Amino acid sequence: MAAPVRPGDDRVIAGVCAGLARRFGVSANTMRAIFLVSCLLPGPQFLLYLALWILLPDERKRTRHAGL
């Protein structure tokens, strides 16, 4: 399995759900629905989303720098 990255396509906000969906082999809409349902539960879901936004590399920047 490849490391998760935030894809350049199929983004809605930051691409976190799309990147996790690719990593786990589910559709991006399914991952977004799972995230929205998880927001109804107590916990740090938004903080986790922000952390993943910062920590997951951006696929667009990775491919841009690979050509240098």
Image (cartoon, grey):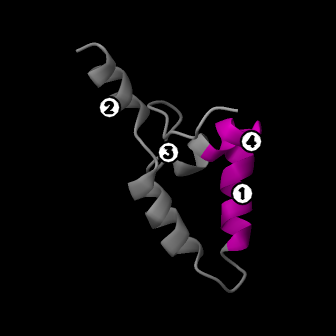
The magenta span reads 20-38
Residue 57 placement: quadrant? top left
Q: Label 2: which residue?
A: 61
Work out how far the residue at label 2 is from the one at label 1, CA to CA, in angstroms: 27 Å
**Local secondary structure at mark 3:** loop
User: Residue 60 in the image: x percent, y percent?
Assistant: 37, 29
The numbered dot on residue 33 is 1
Above or below: residue 62 compared with residue 31: above
Q: Label 4: which residue?
A: 24
Q: Amino acid at mark 3?
A: Gly
Label 1 packing within 10 angstroms: few (<14), some (14-19), many (20+): few
Label 2 packing within 10 angstroms: few (<14), some (14-19), many (20+): few
Q: Amino acid at mark 4?
A: Phe
Q: Label 3: which residue?
A: 15
Work out how far the residue at label 4 is from the one at label 3, CA to CA, in angstroms: 14 Å
User: Residue 39 in the image: x percent, y percent?
Assistant: 65, 75
Which sits earlier in the primary sequence, circle 3 or circle 2?
3
Which sits earlier in the primary sequence, circle 4 or circle 3?
3
Q: Quadrant of the C terminus?
A: top left
**Local secondary structure at mark 4:** helix
Give the left or right position of residue 19, taking residue 41 as reference. Answer: left
**Local secondary structure at mark 2:** helix
Mark 2 or 1, closer to the camera: 2
Give the left or right position of residue 38, taking residue 3 as reference. Answer: right
Which sits earlier in the primary sequence, circle 4 or circle 2?
4
Q: Nearer the viewer, residue 30 or 57?
A: 57
